[in-house]
Amino acid sequence: MERKKYKKVARRAILYLIIMAFLITTFTCLGIGLRYNKEMTKRYSSFALSYTHFASDYIDGDTIEKYLKTNKKDAYYEKVMEMLNAAQRRSGLRYYYVFVPFEDDLVYIWDADNFEGACPLGYHEDYMEGGKEAVEKIYNKNPDEDISITADPTYGYIASAYSPIYNSAGEPVAVAAVDIAMTDVIKNLVGFTIPVIVTVLAVTILSIIAFYLIMKRKLITPIESINKATKAMVQNIRDDNQTDVSVNSGDEIEELADSFNAMHKELRDYIKQNAEITAEKERILTELSLAQKIQASMLPNIFPAFPEREDFDVFASMTPAKEVGGDFYDFFLIDERHIALVIADVSGKGIPAALFMMMSKILIKNAALSGKSPSEVLETVNNQICSNNNEEMFVTVWLGILDLKSGLLTAANAGHEKPIIKNPNGNYGLYPDKNGFVVGGMSGLKYKNYEIRLEKGAKLFLYTDGVAEATNSANELFGIERTIDSLNTVKDASVKDTLAKVKADIDAYVGSAPQFDDLTMLCMEFTGGGDEIVLDATLENVTKSIEFVSQKAEGLNFSHKDNYQIEVAIDEMFSNIARYAYGENTGKAELKVEASDGVLSITLSDSGIPYNPLEKDDPDTTLSAEEREIGGYGIFIVKKVMDEIHYDYKDGKNILTMKKAVKDEEKK
C-alpha cells in the first residue's frame, strides 16, 4: 500500500513568519527614518533661526552704514564680534556672520572667526546658489523667514537661515545669517536608523525563533515523538478492541490520529512496560539532580561575597524552571577598583542549555579579566561561540564593569532585558539602554558600550525574562511594572532582602501555575564615594566634565554666578588638556572633586607633556584687543574666578588643583 504524503506545518509557519518579518521591518524602518529626517530638519531650522534672531536683536542697525563706508572697527564692533565668536563656539555653528546684500554680491560686516575661512570687514563675495533669492525673500519689514538647504561646491551641504537687521527707522539695512553643516543631519539619520533597523531585526528574528521553538516543542516534536512511540508498540502487541479516531487535516495531526487508532489495539503492553519506564525515569532524575548540583556550584553562591569590601554589596539567585537551567549570573573583581557584573539567558532548557551556559560563563569571565571593555568582551565571546556552534544555540547577555572609585558603570547589552536602577533617595526605574544582537547568533558582530554614573547609595537590579514573563493561571504576565513596584516597596532594604521580596511577590502572583522559565536576579548596591572620573581628553568630553563637577557641587549653596564661574574654569582647563597635553594623540584626563565645609576642591590630572599654566604672565588688560598678545586670557580668567589654584608635577602627571568657597552671605 502506497504511503500517503503529508505537508509539513513547520515549513508553512516559517515561510509565513519570514514574509511577515520582512514587511514589518521594511515599513517600520522606512516610517521611522522619514519621520526622524523631518523632525531633525525642523529642529535645525528652529535652531538656526534662533541665532539669526538673536544677532538681529542684539546688533544696532544704525552702525551698519558707518562700518560699510569706513571699513574701520571700534569697541562696539569688537563687542559684537566677541558675541558672535562666543555663540559660534558654544553652538557649533559652521558660519555665523552679518552682511549687506547688493544686487550682484554681498559685503561682510561681521564674520565669526573661530574657524578658518572667516571673511573680514568689507569683504565682497558672490551669493551662493539660492542665496540671493533667500535674502530677497526676507529683506523687508515683514519677512517670511525659513531655512534654505543648498549643496554649494565651496561650502558643502549646508542649511542657511537669514534674518533682517533694522535701523532705528525700521528699515532693513543688513542680514544676520547662520550656516549649519547638514552633514550632521545625515550622520544623525544614519546613526539613528541603523540601530533602529538592527533592533527591529533583532526583535523580529528573536520573535520568529521563539515562536518556532515554542511551536516545535509544544506541537510538532511531541506529535512526532508520540507517533514514533505508538508505531513501535503496534509492532509487538495485538488487541481485539478497536476505537477509531478520524482526522482529516492533511498534515501531521492526521498522521497522529492514524497512529493513535493503531495504538489503541495494543494498550495492554503499555501497562506492562510502565514499571520499566518508571525505573528509567528515576535514573534520569538522579542524573539531573547531580547536574543541578554541578551547575549551582558554578555560580557564586556564598554571601556576603566580599565581606571585606565596604564600597559595594551584591546578592544574586537563580531558580531553574527544570532540574537544570540556561540562565546564569556572575560577579567578580577585575582588580581592586573594578567589578564585573554579568547576567545571561541561554536559549533552550535542560542539559544542553546548562552545558552551553557553563561554557559561556567561563568565556565571558576570561575575556573580562583580560582587561577588555564590555563591548570587546561580548565581541570576543560571540566570535568564539560562533566558531563552533553546531547546535545553533545563543545567549542574551548584559555585562557591566563598575569603577568603584568614580561610580562609572560601563555596560553593553547583547539582546538582554534592560537594567533597573535606583538613584540615592529615589525610586527604581527602567534604564532605556539599547540592545545589541544575541551572542552566538552571528559572527563578526560589534557591540556598543554605554555609561551610567552611580552615586553613593545607588542600586542596580538585573534579571532574566523569567521575572517579567512569570505567568499565573489566567495566563497573565507578572510584567516589568509589577517588578518595579515590588522593588520600590523595599527600595531601602538590603540587596538580599530586595531579591527575597521580588521572589515572594512573583510566587504569590503565579500561585499554583507551573514555572515555564528560569528565574534569575542580581542586585548590587554601590556604597563607594564616586568622587573621581577618568575621561578621554577630548573636546567632546568637556560637557561631561562640567556635568560631573556641577553634580558634585549641588550640595553647596553656590550662587548662579559662582556656578557659572566654576563651569568656565572647568571648560578652560579641560579644553587645554584636550588641545595640548597629548599632541596629536588622545590621552586620559582624571577629574577628582571634593566638597566639604563650604569649599569645592577640583583636581585635574593628565600624563601629557609637563606644563605649568600658572607660569604664563597675565595679559595686560589695559591694552586693546589688537594690542594684547594672543593666548593666556583663559588662564587669567580662571585665576580671577577661582579662590585658589595650584599646580604640581608628580609621578609623571600634571596636577592642577582649583578651589572655590561659598561666600558667607550665600551660606546664610
Image: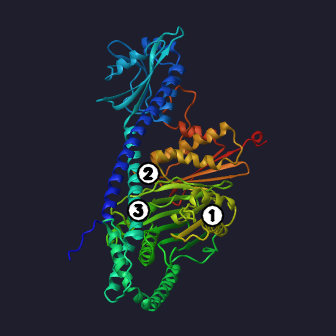
Looking at the image, the residue that sits furthest to the left is 2
Question: 597 or 320, which lies in front?
Answer: 320
Q: Which label belongs to residue 211?
A: 3
Q: Residue 469, image x and y in percent?
A: 53, 63
Q: Is residue 515 above or below residue 98?
A: below
Q: Mark 2 to mark 3: distance in Å? A: 54 Å
Quarter holding residue 532: bottom right
Q: Is residue 619 left or right of residue 666?
A: left
Tell me if label 1 and label 3 are in contact, CB under 8 Å: no
Residue drawn at x 34%, y 88% is 238
Q: Amino acid at mark 1?
A: Glu
Label count reads 3
Q: Which label belongs to residue 525?
A: 1
Q: Which element carries disc 2, helix, strand or loop?
A: loop
Question: 474 or 514, which lies in front?
Answer: 474
Residue drawn at x 45%, y 45% is 579
Count residues near mark 2 (Cα–Cα under 10 Å), then give few for <14, some for 14-19, many for 20+: some
Q: Amino acid at mark 3?
A: Phe
Q: Residue 354, image x and y in percent?
A: 45, 76
Q: Quadrant of the N terminus?
A: bottom left
Residue drawn at x 60%, y 65% is 524
Which is more N-terminal, label 3 or label 2? 3
Q: Residue 316, image x and y in percent?
A: 58, 71
Q: Which element carries disc 1, helix, strand or loop?
A: strand
Q: Is residue 628 above or below residue 553?
A: above
* Residue 103 visible in the picture: yes
| Disc number lying in front (2 or 3) | 3
Query: On the image, numbered disc 2 is attached to which residue?
Result: 582
Q: Is residue 607 left or right of residue 645?
A: left
Tell me if label 2 and label 3 are in contact, CB under 8 Å: no
Q: Mark 1 to mark 3: distance in Å? A: 37 Å
Q: Amino acid at mark 2?
A: Tyr
